[in-house]
Image (cartoon, rainbow, N blue to C red):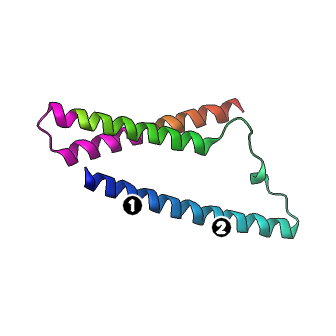
Amino acid sequence: MEEISAVLIVLIIFGFVYATIVLLVRRKERMALIDKGIDAPSFETKPYFNVYALKVGLLFIGVAIGVLLGSTLVELTTLNEESAYFSMVFLFGGLGLVISHYLEKKERKEA
């Protein structure tokens, strides 16, 4: 269980570093566009539908379900701990991302 915690912590740290870099680059690009007097359509946001929050939320829900089912698999079957946890976390984390993709696709069609 300690190995899984260490891997998750490393993944979360890399995710935060990546998000920070992306946000800084995006801010720099926007500031350059504003300096040139160009109105970027990417500044427009929809107030009621935040895609990133949905995507991250469904990913975390999927990971949580994966951890719970991985624990159940360890207790009820002869699978070793690592394969049960990792397979369920990736399966349900990916499932959460696929669901968010289809929800986002549906929202874009409605808008």
- Which of the pair 48/10 is nearer the observer? 10
What are the residue bounds of the magenta stretch? 73-95
Q: Is residue 102 visible?
A: yes
For mark 2, give the secondary structure.
helix
The x, y position of residue 44, in whole percent, is 78, 48
Question: Mark 2, mark 1: which one is toward the viewer?
Answer: 1
Question: Residue flagged by tag 1: what amino acid is it?
Answer: Val
> Residue 10 shows which numbered tag?
1
Q: Residue at x 72, y 68 (%)?
A: 28
Image position of 94 (left or right of 57):
left
Work out whether residue 97 can be spotted: no
Number of marks present in the image shown: 2
- The amino acid pointed to by label 2 is Val
Disc 2/disc 1 C-alpha distance (Å): 23 Å
Q: Residue at x 17, y 34 (%)?
A: 75
Q: Residue at x 41, y 37 (%)?
A: 62
